[in-house]
Image (cartoon, coloured by chain):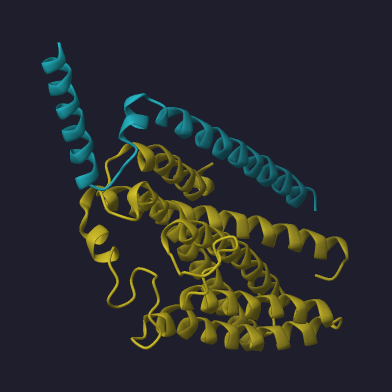
Amino acid sequence: MKKLSFLFLMLLSFAVQAQESSPAMADTFRKEGKIYVVVLVLATIFAGIIAYLVRLDRKISKLEKEN
Amino acid sequence: MRRNWWKILGVLFVGYTIVAGFLTPVPRMNILNETIRNLYFHVPMWFAMMVLLTVSVVYSILYLRKFNIKDDVISSQFAYAGILFSLLGMATGMQWASGTWDSGTPNYFGWTGDVKQKCAAICILIYFAYVILRGGLKDEDKRAKISAVYNIFAYALMIPLLYIIPRSDKVNSLHPGAKGNPAFNQYDLDNTMKLVFYPSVIGWILISLWVANLFTRYRLLELKKENAL
């Protein structure tokens, strides 16, 4: 059991080293799928802003026709 | 609908970058790490500003040739929209810099005192002066003439401030693209980033043109109501 846990610790330290040798990226974050939440939030805000722009464009077009 | 195709294209391109910008792989680099994705959003702001201010200066020249007040309206509204995008570019640049440029001095909202930031700030102040100049002149023709001439000078000053001084060997700007700095060459060559970056630039330029177009049409309506046109 002791041997096994020692081996496990060794492996873990190797894994940590391997991660440090290449620049840190949000790998775990991506694996958990949380990046989709970020994309969804940004897409929602963007959709809202575009909806506002479209509405503004239509209102101005209407005023242009009336004049 | 057929006349609005470019607006739809802009929205599609930027919508695509919001999704692809976060989901596609990027080069793994020290210091930058995931912030490299800011390239998709920060740089297009400056591209958009550049296009809007170029349109603005072209209409200033057109105004000075024909003295048509409509050219002055287009010129001024495109300059205002350009200032909006320059402020967005400045803010996003400072936010990005606050996490990546260690200047060794206290960091207030990402102001690192880098040459690129100083020059960009001077450029924005020059355009603020344009807004103030227009606000200060009541006579319409005088305002149009003086601000058109000022706009040409402001544009001519922007080129060295943004593209020449920060790239000089003597000033050591940390901003990528300047000589002796890492990053731009590396990600310029990365083909997956190009697939997101170029659509983003085109998309934001189109959206910025849409915004400036709305500014202009609104101002023209306002003038029509005042019977000034």
- The image quadrant where one finds the N terminus of chain A is top left
Q: Which chain identifier belongs to the cyan chain?
A: A
Q: Which chain is yellow?
A: B
Residue B38 vs B78, above or below: the answer is above
Residue at the (57%, 78%) spot, across then down: B123
B209 relative position to A6: left or right: right
User: Which image quarter: residue B202?
Assistant: bottom left
Q: Is residue B83 above or below residue B64?
A: above
From the top left corner, tell me how far across and down residue B223 is, in percent: 81, 65
Q: Nearer the viewer, residue B56 or B23?
A: B23
Residue A49: percent from the left, percent from the top?
Answer: 61, 41
- Which residue does the image show at 75% across and 63% down from the upper left? B220
Q: Nearer the viewer, residue A5 or A37?
A: A5
In the rendered image, residue B65, in percent from the top left (x then y), is placed at 62, 88
Residue drawn at x 51%, y 48% is B7
Q: Going by the image, does A36 lie left or right of B59?
A: left
Question: Residue B5 vs residue A61: left or right?
Answer: left
Residue B85: name its quadrant.
bottom right
